[in-house]
Amino acid sequence: MVTSMKEYQFQYTSISQSFFVAITSIVMSVLTGFLLGYLTLNFLWLSASMLVVGFGVFRLLRGNAIHSCTAKLSETAVDFEFDDSEKNIQFSELTSYKFYDGKNGPILYLRTNTENFKLFTNENFCQSDDFKVFCNDIMAQLDRYRMSNPAAILIHEGSIFEKKGMLYFLAIATVAYLLALYFVPFKEFRIVFGLSIGSSFLLMWVKYFSANKKMTS
């Protein structure tokens, strides 16, 4: 019997390379602020210069972290064709699987007894819609495989926002953030710090309540 396969093409982001790009951009931005500080520029010009340099370095380097993948999904396996390698994962070898929309983009986990395969797309680097389509389809296919093979030891894990300790983590982290915001010495930095970090906390709370609503529905 020939098993039909559906093909997907999407971009994904290298974790190590994206981390390098982000750190390099931040370092160059801070270094710019340090060097221009000697020119006694006002806060607005100094901030604008730091943003322009940081964003420019990011745009220049981010292509190094973006890669292409072709995935072929069947009823019992998935084949990945990367830029310089290929990988086959049989569903019968999996012990658990998970997909969730992280702060920076979708993340897919496929675990066996010997490997924790992880694939993700950082939306700050590249478009993620095609990858999300693939992730939703492979999750549905794995659910069907698990239902039709009850003897298989295969677990569909919840996202990090569905973990029991997530509420305590968010509460403690939010309190720490508010305290840090209160003690920031300069009003201008308090505004920048509040907007940049506060939006991330707000997004995490939204994802937490959304995930838990899904669990109870």
Image (cartoon, rainbow, N blue to C red):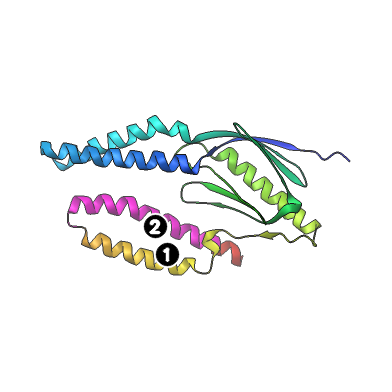
Q: Position of residue 136 (x, y in %)?
A: 64, 47
Residue 151 picture quarter:
bottom right
Tell me the element at label 1. Answer: helix
Range drawn in magenta: 185-211
Residue at position x 23%, y 54% in the image: 190
- Extreme-top residue of the structure: 60
Magenta span has 6? no
**Which residue is labeled 1 in the image?**
170
Left or right: 69 with respect to 148?
left
Under mark 2, the amino acid is Phe
Q: Tell me how far mark 2 sits from mark 1, CA to CA.
A: 8 Å
Residue at position x 78%, y 46% in the image: 75
* Quadrant in the picture for the N terminus: top right
- Extreme-right residue of the structure: 1
- Foreground residue among 130 and 28: 28
**Which residue is labeled 2 in the image?**
201
Residue at position x 27%, y 65% in the image: 179
